[in-house]
Amino acid sequence: MSFQDIEAGFGTSASNNNTTFSTPESPEDAAFRSLQSSLSLQMLKINANVQGILKLVDQLGTGRDSAALRKSLHDLTDSTRAMAKRGSEDLKKLTNQQVKLPHQKTSLQKTSHDFQLSLIGFQRAQQLSAERQRTVVQGVKMAVEDGVEDGEIEQTSTSPSQRQAQILQAQLSPHELAYQESLIHEREEDIREIEAGVHELAEIFRDLGTLVHQQGGMLDNIDYNIQSVHVDTSRAAEELTTAHEYQRRAGRRAACLMIILVVVVAIVLLACETTPIPYSITYHYASSSITRDLILSFFLRKIDAHEKLKVIPVRIELLLSIRCPSGEKAMRVWTSNNMDSPGVGSIMLGTDEHLLLPSAHTLLLNVDDLSVYSEQLEHLPGYFAGGSGGSQLFCSNVKVASPPVPFKELPAWPSNVEAHPLLVIDYELLKAGDKTEIDRLWEAGSTLGFWYLKNHGGEQLFPAMWGMAEDVFALPLEEKMTFEQGDEGLSFGYKAVGHYITDAQGTPDPVEGLDIAKDDALAYPKVARRSYADRVNEHMEPTIAPFVEKCIELSNTMLDIFNDKLGLPAGTLAKFHQRNDHSSSETRTIRAPANLPQGKLAVGGHTDFGTISFLVNNIGGLQVLPPGDTEWRNVRPLPGHVVCNIADALTIFSGGLLNSNIHRVVPPSGAQSAYERWSSVYFTRPSNDTVLQPLLESSIVSDAFNKLTEERQKSLTPGVTSYEWFTRRQKNYRTKNHKGTETWAANRGTENGRA
């Protein structure tokens, strides 16, 4: 079976996906999409925070109410309010960008609609919080103000808040009553702050009024009469209409001025006799990230070849290329430079990250474009200045360098190597509840246990992890080893070559790796599980956290589908994978060296420890062992696709219905073997205290489990927690812990002796 046949029968063709994956987009579209992705991530965080606020509000006035709970509620509300403000500003910027991108109108409308829904949810959560706190305060006030003789409690009270007050009064001493009075003042202050926040949110809604008017008056039905704040909606509509017309006229004037400016600049450039000198600067400093509003200024010194010219109108193309969460981005600027008065060019970058320019660092220079390199620019005159605080980056001795290894153009899949057929699952269809696609996902999970996932929205996030790891791997080995996890059974941190065994004989692996705990990525800058190198921390917010957020989203969507297919009560699998519960969920980025001998294992045969895994790699090498087969089959990486697979916990929960299949990594075939192999993986694993056992409350699971052999049933009922399962396997994979074949046997999961 050819690979084209595979795609024809199992999903969208690879050729089509390749075409889509490689289609270039304009810098304006890239900036728009990057800012839109950032806003989507903020909406995701706002929605998650709203759920957290509602859970905390439910506990107010109960036995679980405490100062710590109220502080958590206060902090979560404040952080969500800040995100709402930031998101509002980003939406305004998106609206301004879309004026020049009419084809993005529908996309902007959807983003605006989703953001407004997020704000409405937050608004309602704040209102509920204020109402609940008023009820609690009223109850405490009654306890303080109304005496109850001899501590007796009237049983005739008809109000729950009155009964709560009487109980509280009967139990409190005078000192405690005084303390409660102080709490009343504190809570009333919280209520006033919440009311101010609700008012502030109403202001945000009004600030977005112009956009609302353009998109059909979506917020006409939102109640702005919040806590005595009266809004004259009819007058606002008139103001918005006037503003809208003014904006359109201003836009036309700006367009005319821009055309005139372009014509003038073109005439000036054509009048110049100097040949244009195009060149590009690529900034590859490890600790850098980008800021949306960063202005980079550059100056060129006098060039010897033009000393006799009084004016040097050199046309320059400056290409700044920096790896960021959505992949490698480049923004161009054209300018002219005068020998006596150097010109200044500015770049406005459309991302949310921050560029921290050091006081000195070597710039990497590429000529003409990123695929052409020259050794003749060793001593280009000039220097590059920029950053905050007047920091300068001198480049009088500029080095020429190629892009990072993972981004190099790589050889195609060898034509003589057969790829094993995997189903191609469309994530957008899964989210839409498409029954056929959901059935296909179940088929993939219950047979081979591997499938491709497309249209997942993380196409640039997985390769961005390669760039992050490359920066970290460049550190000295002794520094990296200070962040090696050790032998206690967890895997977070750096992994040197030879860290793991690949077979029963204890052969060490040839790969280098870096694991980041999900808990640390979400908690940053706080430390949840362990510390990391500073260079890792510099990538935590711009690269690692968005990657983790996307993988959590993918995982949750599929877990809900499998939950329904297994006939489990709603939310059963979700409760084992709570976002804020500690688990061994982690990212893993691996670099395998080029030119490994054929037959040398990079990663030995195994099943994954957790629930679901998500993988992207740049070249081949991944192999699967289909159930009942003895021949390893190759899995071909597809551009824009994630390779997903079922892991041990989901096999156990499902009573063996879902298949955690054996896989391994070998050297790539053909011309690809001459290149480093990069992999980005996310392992979803249950919360540490989750007991691994079949979920027999489902008749579907119990029927399947009862049909298994006694040996297989035993392998699927380990009777341990997720933490114990993971640490047992992890410890026995360590090369330092290997004592013989029994160590290899002790690191097995649900393979049941198949590898």
Image (spheres, grey):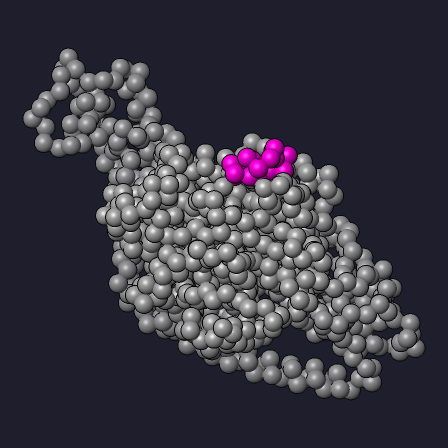
At x 91%, y 72%, the residue is: 304
At x 81%, y 61%, the residue is: 399
Horizontal side, residue 48 vs residue 30: left or right: left
Question: In this picture, is 748 found above or below 124?
Answer: above
The stretch drawn in magenta includes residue 478 = no
The picture places residue 159, in percent across and down from the top left corner, at: 13, 33
State whether residue 589 appears in this view.
yes
The picture places residue 718, in percent across and down from the top left corner, at: 39, 36
Residue furthest left as drawn: 156
* Observer-nearest of 685 and 697: 697
Q: In which quarter of the image is residue 721?
A: top left
The main secondary structure of the magenta stretch is helix
* Observer-nearest of 79 and 328: 328
At x 68%, y 38%, the residue is: 481
Question: In this picture, is 754 found above or below 291?
Answer: above
The picture places residue 643, in percent across and down from the top left corner, at: 49, 60
- The number of numbered badges drawn on the structure is 0
The stretch drawn in magenta includes residue 734 = yes
Residue furthest top as drawn: 150
At x 30%, y 18%, the residue is: 176
Horizontal side, residue 284 vs residue 682: left or right: right
The picture places residue 168, in percent across and down from the top left corner, at: 22, 22
* Observer-nearest of 509 and 570: 509
* Residue span colored magenta: 730-747
Q: Quadrant of residue 725?
A: top left
State whether residue 538 appears in this view.
no
Question: In this picture, is 12 found above or below 291?
Answer: below
Question: In this picture, is 81 found above or below 156?
Answer: below
Q: Quadrant of residue 333?
A: bottom right
